[in-house]
DNA sequence: TAATGCGGGAAGC
DNA sequence: GCTTCCCGCATTA
């Protein structure tokens, strides 16, 4: 938005404060969900944005009581690092996600560094005048207002899903190994030459909690960490997991799509009943445990990898470029569509995924497919300080799941079929 | 088991 | 009075 060409309404949508008695309701464009909000940002999300509904952040944010039930306040916990400042292979540092639960965090800090077995330490966030960065959430009308105060003065921890995946892998290492051994046998899925990710590195990254570049977390989340343009409020609903775009006004900011991995819960009584601040329209049509639907989607070339009911294995994807080069051949297996080098600059995909139907499900699957079969657009590797040194190393890709009930063989059959389906690709990937 | 949200209460300014 | 932090509790996944 051009600052110098603002109408009164536009100014209103920019000048609000989370503590205002009345927040703007004539918002023309809502923001896309930001996974890594930093500095003093304000965003207006659609009340139907599931990630916003759940007040998600990839920073480890804990609830802070501000004695104001209308405004949810969360403060950053920082990042857990190795007190020896050890580096793993390729210079990777250990940046664990602090557990949100106090007891779990204490327990976590008693553990040893997964890399060097040294003691772990928590780097507290002091980015807001010596206090933790705080995020404020307020549901008002059709919108969810977000405001952050402070600038994180510590590295990004692993994302929530990365941490969950790490825990899950630790709990069920055999299942994942088995999955990977099957993956390796799958003829349809081949890493790019020279980009063969090792299972060891994958499991190390996931199990041992090393900070993954955003690309990793993106695909753990089921989408690229990126920015997406604000969508209009009417069509914003259900645009889960859209490929994001860069915020042209802020090259460092991230505007993330609603989390693909978000379970499409049929209801969230806690959210919907929250002080009448939210007008819930959470009519999830893609059930968390609806594996049958998932199967159908996969058979149609859709991907529900972001649904937690998805398969519990990790795909050894190659470097994820977050770009859609013109030379991409949709007929190629999607793994091989991925160029080795990330784009030099963010791309805008503002209008790539308009939710014309207002159909949560359709939008979701389209986007999922995009993320799965075609490199997501609009990702800036510069966004992630950890990505830069690692661009030459393979990125791994995992399909998050909380259960082991997924039939891996079936899944791979679907994958093999889907990724060779040109028509489907052309139909479902409007980037072409 | 952990994440999340709510709320009481203490402490510092 | 405001803010931050700690704690316990309930709910959810």
Image: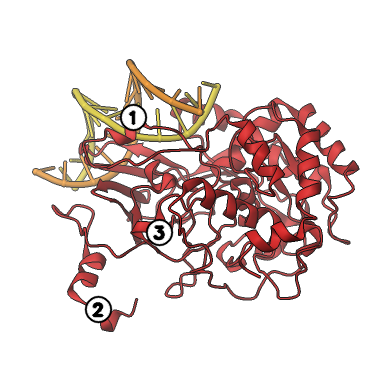
Chain colours: A red, B yellow, C orange
* Residue A32 or residue A279, whichever sits in front: A279
Please state the chain letter of the residue tagged with numbered disc 3 in the rendered image. A
Q: Quadrant of residue A175?
A: top right
Q: Residue at x 23, y 49 (%)?
A: A141
Mark number, residue A269: 1
Tags 2 and 1 on a common chain: yes
Residue that label 3 marks? A151
Which corner quadrant holds the N terminus of chain A? Answer: bottom left
Among the two numbered marks 1 and 3 on one chain, the one whose residue lies closer to the N terminus:
3
> Mark 3 falls on what kind of element?
loop
Which corner quadrant holds the C terminus of chain A? Answer: bottom right
Among the two numbered marks 2 and 1 on one chain, the one whose residue lies closer to the N terminus:
2
> Mark 1 falls on what kind of element?
helix
Of circles 2 and 3, which is in front? 2
The picture places residue A361, in percent across and down from the top left corner, at 51, 45
Residue that label 2 marks? A6
The picture places residue A303, in percent across and down from the top left corner, at 65, 46
Q: CA distance from mark 2 to mark 3?
A: 27 Å
* Residue A401 or residue A65, whichever sits in front: A401
Examine the rendered structure and indicate whether residue A417 appears above or below residue A233: above
Please state the chain letter of the residue tagged with numbered disc 2 in the rendered image. A
The picture places residue A84, in percent across and down from the top left corner, at 65, 45
Tags 1 and 3 on a common chain: yes
């Amino acid at each position: 938005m051009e600052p110098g060409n603002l109408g009164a309404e536009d100014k209103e949508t920019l000048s609000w404060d989370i503590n205002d008695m009345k927040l703007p309701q004539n918002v023309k464009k809502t923001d896309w969900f930001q996974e890594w909000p930093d500095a003093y940002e304000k965003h207006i999300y659609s009340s139907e944005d599931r990630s916003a509904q759940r007040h998600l952040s990839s920073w480890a944010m804990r609830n802070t009581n501000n004695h104001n039930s209308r405004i949810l306040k969360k403060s950053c916990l920082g990042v857990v690092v190795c007190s020896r400042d050890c580096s793993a292979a390729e210079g990777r540092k250990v940046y664990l996600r602090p557990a949100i639960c106090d007891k779990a965090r204490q327990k976590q800090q008693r553990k040893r560094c997964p890399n060097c077995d040294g003691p772990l330490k928590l780097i507290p966030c002091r980015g807001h005048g010596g206090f933790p960065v705080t995020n404020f959430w307020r549901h008002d009308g059709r919108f969810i207002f977000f405001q952050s105060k402070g600038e994180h003065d510590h590295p990004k921890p692993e994302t929530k899903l990365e941490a969950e995946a790490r825990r899950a892998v630790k709990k069920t290492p055999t299942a994942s190994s088995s999955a990977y051994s099957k993956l390796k046998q799958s003829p349809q899925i081949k890493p790019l030459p020279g980009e063969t990710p090792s299972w060891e590195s994958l499991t190390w990254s996931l199990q041992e909690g090393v900070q993954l570049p955003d690309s990793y977390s993106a695909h753990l989340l089921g989408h690229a960490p990126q920015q997406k343009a604000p969508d209009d409020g009417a069509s914003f609903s259900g645009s889960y997991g859209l490929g994001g775009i860069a915020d042209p006004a802020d090259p460092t900011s991230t505007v993330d799509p609603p989390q693909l991995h978000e379970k499409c819960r049929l209801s969230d009584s806690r959210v919907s009943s929250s002080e009448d601040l939210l007008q819930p329209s959470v009519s999830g049509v893609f059930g968390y445990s609806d594996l049958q639907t998932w199967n159908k989607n996969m058979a149609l070339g859709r991907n529900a990898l972001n649904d937690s009911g998805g398969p519990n294995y990790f795909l050894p994807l190659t470097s994820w470029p977050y770009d859609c080069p013109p030379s991409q051949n949709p007929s190629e297996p999607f793994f091989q569509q991925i160029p080795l080098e990330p784009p030099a600059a963010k791309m805008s995909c503002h209008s790539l995924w308009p939710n014309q139907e207002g159909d949560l499900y359709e939008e979701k699957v389209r986007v999922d497919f995009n993320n799965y079969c075609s490199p997501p657009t609009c990702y800036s590797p510069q966004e992630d300080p950890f990505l830069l040194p690692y661009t030459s190393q393979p990125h791994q890709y995992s399909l998050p799941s909380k259960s082991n009930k997924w039939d891996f063989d079936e899944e791979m059959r679907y994958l093999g079929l889907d990724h060779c389906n040109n028509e489907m690709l052309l139909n479902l990937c409007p980037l072409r």
